[in-house]
Image (cartoon, rainbow, N blue to C red):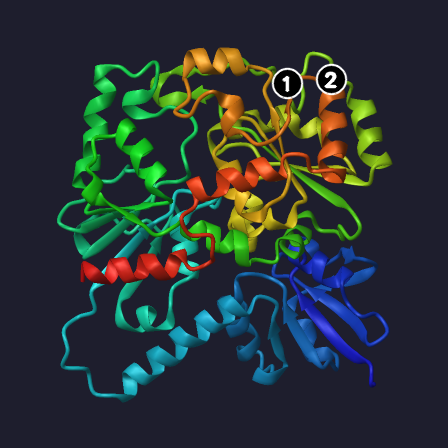
Amino acid sequence: MKQQTIIIFGTGSSAESFYRNLNASNVKVAAFLDNDSAKWTTTKFGIPVREVHYICKIEFDHIVIASQFVEPIFQQLMELGVPFERIVPLYPYYFTQYLHERYKATLGTLLLPPHSKKKKAIGLLSTSNSGCNCIALFKGMPCAIREKYDVRLITSENDEGDTESFDVFVSTHRNHSLGRAKNIELWHGFPLKAMGRMHRSSASKDMASAEVWQEADAIASYSPLYSTLMSACFPTTVRQYQITGMPRNDLLLGSDGRSNLERIVGKSLEHKKLLLYMPTFRVFSSREAVEGKRNLDNLFGFSDFQEEAFHAYLQEHNLFLIVKLHEFEKHIQNNLEKFQSEHVFLLKSGYLVQEGLDLYELINGVDLLLTDYSSVFFDYLLLNRPIVFVTNDLTEYQADRGFLLSPYDSWTPGPKVNSQSFLEMEIINSLDRDPYESERAALLPMIHTYQDAKSSERIWSMIEQFL
């Protein structure tokens, strides 16, 4: 087979991951391209980084766009005369989306305007890329919905104003003025922690904001148990709930998590056992309250934590730890930077945004989940993999906030650890023997009525009922 000469457009983590996975016997990389002039005198893997016009000086077979910004880069290359068939996007989703909009706009100039009414508008409000049901719903949108309606994903970067322009508005945090739009609430997880009226420290002033729940025309639900728990926390009625499952679990079940993690981390994780640590937050800024008592001097808050010994343990057992803090605790990331190493990676939300990924497109790539009181473990049950619970401040957390489901041990199918030695022992024990598999299997149907990857389909059908 003739060796192909390619150029890689981009120098970020996507480009690095792509380069590391190339078939070196069949592919030669002539150059990396970047629009940042500061990089033009540098190299990547010993290969020069060039400005874009360099492509006019060399022969090549393909240019690979290793970036989510397909549209402007594609346009730039076309203007430089690069043949369409030589441009290869690493992320076809963004390329397909660009082509759809490009051809749609061109056809719009050729055809007579339709006599039908303006498309009805659907707004999906995303607050982050950390398990967002609206992002997942947008990614799981059927082509027929895309053609029939004006669907917009609203983020902090493209805020499209109030909801008055939408016919249906989909939210995840009950945090938006709804106006005239029909509203569907997806929320952001199956609750273990007490919330709303059930929160131990809830004051009467907090209840007024909770009344917006009564404005929801429909609330997506995991199961009858979920509907019951949410009704205990917020003033809702059984008629508002429709059991659909959650879109983010479509991503959990259907994504290539390990490949996506390698894109984020920027290196191969082959033959590694991957651990994901996702603790919940302790600082509740809207109530100016601290819940629980976690030591921020080390990753797990252990009083006996020995950093060097822990890194040696990870190396000895061929383990790689990814740490993802709650969105509320971005302010403590700097405290944990020092713990990053060859075996520990601090996953920041910005990395997800840069790669156009949601957190739930990574989670199925890990072999074991470490958490405390976060609802993520309820979703992780769908993967039937081991979970270890870090419970240093269980007594304090229960006193400060409380749990909807108790006793805590009965609803958390995994070992509970509060020291480094127990953590290290239970990680290996869980990976080797998985002693809590039967407990997870017993809990699964109570949490998830649906255990497939079709929640988005069901919710889009529900949305159409309101249109």
**Element type at mark 1:** loop
* 327 left or right of 241 in image: right
Residue 351: image x %, image y %? 58, 46
The quarter in which the N terminus is drawn is bottom right
> In the displayed structure, would residue 326 be above or below residue 357?
above
Task: Judge by depth and name the residue closer to the eye, 394 or 13.
Answer: 394
Task: Judge by depth and name the residue closer to the eye, 233 or 169.
Answer: 233
Residue 202: image x %, image y %? 30, 17
* 152 left or right of 291 in image: left
Q: Which label belongs to residue 165? A: none
Residue type, label 1 = Gly
Q: Name the residue at 39% across, 24% down.
A: 404
The quarter in which the C terminus is drawn is bottom left
Q: In which image quadrant can residue 238 be found?
A: top left
Label 1: which residue? 301
Q: Are marks 1 and 2 in contact (CB under 8 Å)?
A: yes
Q: Name the residue at 77% across, 57% down.
A: 44
Disc 1 packing (10 Å; few <14; some 14–19; many ≥20): some
Residue 410: image x %, image y %? 51, 25
Task: Judge by depth and name the residue closer to the eye, 298 or 461.
Answer: 461
Q: In which image quadrant can residue 11 be found?
A: bottom right
> In the displayed structure, would residue 445 be above or below residue 286?
below
- Answer yes or no: is residue 376 visible: yes
Label 2: which residue? 305
